[in-house]
Amino acid sequence: MMKSKPEALPASMAERIMDSAESLLAQRGYHGFSYDDVAQQVGIKKPSIHHHFAKKEILAAAIVHRYSLGFQGHLKDIEDTYNTVKARLKAYAELFQQTYQSERKLCVCGMLGAEAAALPVLVNQEVQNFFQMNLAWLTSIIATAESDGLDTTRQQAESRAFVFLSVLEGSMVVGRGLQDRRGPIDVAQVWLGCFYP
C-alpha cells in the first residue's frame, strides 16, 4: 500500500509574524509599520509578537537576515543554472524584477538602505551585510568575464558590480515614484548591452 504524502506543516507563529512584517517593510519602510499592524494582519494580539521578538529592531534584523539567506540561495541557483556572465547578470536582475512586479514593491534592503540614517545599529548591520554579500557575488561573476572572451580587471569588476546593483535598486525607486511599468529588467537590458553585447 502506498503511503500518503505527508501534509505540509503550517508556518510557525514566528514565521507568520516575519512574513507579515517583511511585506510591510517592503511597502512602508521601518518607520511605516508598527506591531499593531502586524498583529492585525496575522490575527493575534501585540503581546504575542513581543513573545517572539522583544523589540522591533530584533524583528527587522531577523527579517533582513532571513532575506539575505534566501537571496544567497538564489545566487547559488543562478551559478548552477547559467554559464555566461551576461546570462547570470540577467538572471540576477530578474530577482529584482520579481519583487518589483508584485505591487511595485521594493527590495527590503533597498527600502531599509534609504532609511539607514534613522535605523537601529542592529538593523543597519544586517542591511550592510546584504549589500556587501551582493557586491562580492557580482564582482566575482563580472571578474570571470575573461572566460567569455572579455577583458575585465578586478577594479573594473568592482566598479561595474556597484553600478549594476545601484541601477537595479534605483530603477525600483524611480519606477515606483513614476508609477511606471518599467522596472529592473528594462534597465538591466540597457546596462548589459553596454558591456556584454
Image (spheres, rainbow, N blue to C red):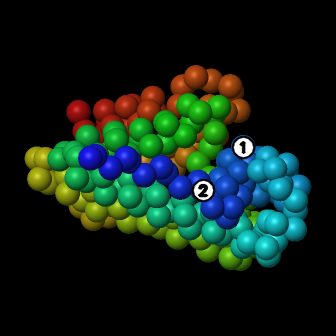
Mark 1 falls on what kind of element?
helix
What is the x, y in percent for residue 133? 44, 66
Compute the Cα span from label 1 to label 2. 22 Å
| Residue 44 x, y percent position in the rendering | 83, 56
Q: Is residue 170 left or right of residue 135?
A: right
- Name, please, the residue furthest toward the front: 1
Query: As drawn, which residue projects farthest toward the top?
Result: 181
The image shows residue 3 at horizontal and vertical percentages of 32, 49
Q: Examine the rendering and report whether any part of residue 3 can be seen.
A: yes
Q: Relative to the observer, which residue lies in front, 11 or 24?
A: 11
Say few, some or many: other residues with alpha carbon within 10 Å of mark 2 (under 14 / 14 to 19 / 20 or more).
few
**Front residue of this view, candidates 147 and 153:** 147
Q: Residues within 10 Å of mark 1 (few under 14, many from 20)?
A: some
Give above or below for 31 relative to 104. below
Left or right of residue 51, residue 46 in this image: right
Residue 117 vs 177, above or below: the answer is below
